Amino acid sequence: MNQEELEKKYGMSFAKEDIRKRTIRDMVLLLFAGIVYYLIVSYTPFGLRCYFLSLFGLKCPSCGVTRMAVSAVHFDFKSAFGYNPYIFVTLPYIIYEITYLFYLNESKKKMNRINMIILCVWIGLLIIFGILRNIYNW
């Protein structure tokens, strides 16, 4: 499909500037949601609990992410690393990937093959981390 057909199908502009604006809007909304969640977790007794941990007594690959984020906001990077080392180390990639996926969604493009392979490797390593953290009690 060419750009005009896409614009007609989805009822929106696919000019680069419009795609950029929508991607930035989506990232700002995601950041706002993160700030609201941080405030809820920090100043109320509410927060997300890990159902995997509750059901099986094992840490899932993302256990500790909220505590990691709160520690990182307070510049306590040693504790942040201790809560979830894999997510902490790969956080720049995660931020890039989320931004890229927002861009792909707004431009109605498909993910390129190399990025798909990298994402699959990252997910595979996340699963391996989840297994190893329970074996070695990380």
Image (cartoon, helix red, strand yellow):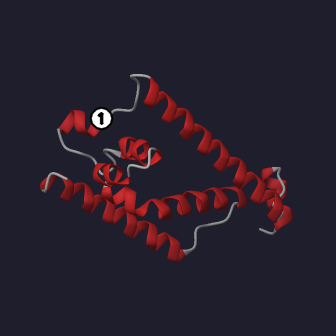
Q: In this view, does 92 lie to the left or right of 56?
A: right
Q: Assess disc 1: are there few (<14), some (14-19) or many (≥20) residues with their C-alpha within 10 Å of its C-alpha.
A: few
Could you tell me which quadrant the N terminus lies in? bottom right
Q: Residue furthest front?
A: 75
Q: Quadrant of residue 4?
A: bottom right
x 56%, y 33%: residue: 36
What is the secondary structure assignment of the residue under circle 1? helix
Q: Looking at the image, which is closer to me, 137 or 11?
A: 137
x 45%, y 66%: residue: 119
> Horizontal and vertical percent for residue 126?
33, 60
Figure label count: 1
Q: Residue furthest bottom?
A: 114
Q: Is residue 61 left or right of residue 25?
A: left
> Horizontal and vertical percent for residue 71?
39, 45
x 23%, y 45%: residue: 59
> Horizontal and vertical percent for residue 62?
34, 48
> Horizontal and vertical percent for residue 29?
65, 42
Q: Quadrant of residue 98?
A: bottom right
The answer to whether residue 37 is above or below residue 103 is above
**Label 1, on which residue?**
51
Q: Looking at the image, which is closer to me, 48 or 124?
A: 48
For badge 1, the amino acid type reads Tyr
Q: Looking at the image, which is closer to me, 89 or 17?
A: 89
The answer to whether residue 43 is above or below residue 82 is above
